[in-house]
Amino acid sequence: MVRKIELILPTEYEEAWERLKSLYGLGDGELLMKLIETELQTMKTREHIEAYEKVERAMREIEEVAGIDGLIEFANNVSLIAKKIREAIE
């Protein structure tokens, strides 16, 4: 079964959309499918979805109160935590 979807891309996303198309070498429809496939692979279970949503909420909160500098610091801290967890598992 095929479903046709109309995508209205806000102007502020146009530059990023074009960069993604260039990066992947895909057209509009193909890029949209690639992004959907990637998202579905990433969020395999409800637990995955809830965990990713928690991280996304935290990122938005940090950016709201601390701006891009706070978001960068948050991302760096998350990377350090991930590294420590990987090292503990290995």
Image: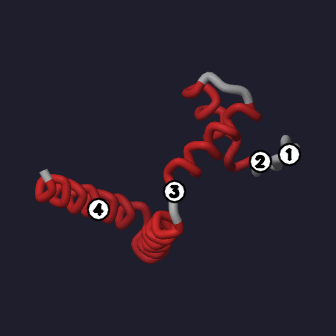
- Type of residue at label 2? Leu
Closer to the chain start, of discs 4 and 2, is 2
Q: Residues within 10 Å of mark 4 (few under 14, many from 20)?
A: few
For the N terminus, the image quarter is top right
- Residues under numbered marks 2 and 3 in contact, where contact means CB atoms less than 8 Å apart: no
The span from disc 2 to disc 3 (Cα, nearest Å) is 26 Å
The span from disc 2 to disc 1 (Cα, nearest Å) is 19 Å
Closer to the chain start, of discs 1 and 3, is 1
Q: Secondary structure at mark 2?
A: loop
Classify residue 65 by image quadrant. Answer: bottom left
In this rendered view, identify the residue nearer to me: 48 or 27. 48
Query: Does 3 appear above or below 48?
Result: above
Left or right of 14 on screen, residue 83: left
Q: Nearer the viewer, mark 3 or mark 4?
A: 3
Residue 60 visible, this orientation: no
Classify residue 16 by image quadrant. Answer: top right
Q: Nearer the viewer, mark 2 or mark 3?
A: 3
The span from disc 4 to disc 1 (Cα, nearest Å) is 38 Å
